Image (cartoon, grey):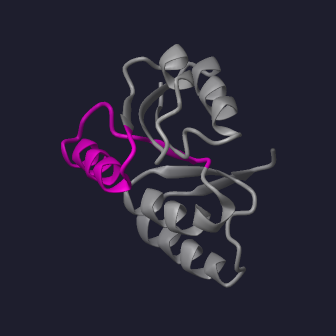
Amino acid sequence: MKNFALIGAAGYIAPRHMAAIKATGNRLVAAYDPFDSVGIIDSHFPDAYFFTEFERFDRHVDKLRRSASDEAPDFISICSPNYLHDSHIRFALRSGANVICEKPLVVNPWNLDAIAEIERETGNRVNSILQ
């Protein structure tokens, strides 16, 4: 079983990610969205932590990673608006997680080089999928 965190939990595509995480026998340990209208999380993962402030989500993910908890995210699924993908991918990689992100990964192609460099530094990977 793998642990997932999700960024953009109130977005259009997030329920599909949650359903896929559950269908594959994995678990969602934490989710973030600035909007708190995401009751769908409770129907799939009632024990998942939910944050409306990115700083608190960041702190929680870091705490899980540093404590060597069995809940540290193995993957962070990014369902945020396209213009935020780049910064959320960087956050996820630096948090010690692999990334699942809808296309486009970045708005500006030159940002791909920096992401590739962070992948090399961390040993984690970015996995892109089409809707």
Residue at figure coordinates x 81%, y 48% from the top left: 130
Q: Is residue 47 above or below residue 115?
A: above
Left or right: 51, with 98 as reference point: left
Snapshot quadrant of residue 47: top left
Residue 102 lies, in percent from the top left, at 71, 52
Residue at figure coordinates x 46%, y 48% from the top left: 34
Give the residue furthest to the bottom: 110
Residue 40 lies, in percent from the top left, at 57, 23
**Residue 107, magenta (yes or no):** no
Residue at figure coordinates x 32%, y 32% from the top left: 71
Residue 113 lies, in percent from the top left, at 62, 81
Residue 109 lies, in percent from the top left, at 72, 80
**Residue 67, magenta (yes or no):** yes
Q: Quadrant of the C terminus?
A: top right
Snapshot quadrant of residue 112: bottom right
Left or right: 116, with 131 as reference point: left
Q: Is residue 56 above or below residue 84?
A: above
Give the residue furthest to the left: 67
Q: Which residues are magenta?
A: 51-79
1 or 71, which is in the foreground? Answer: 71
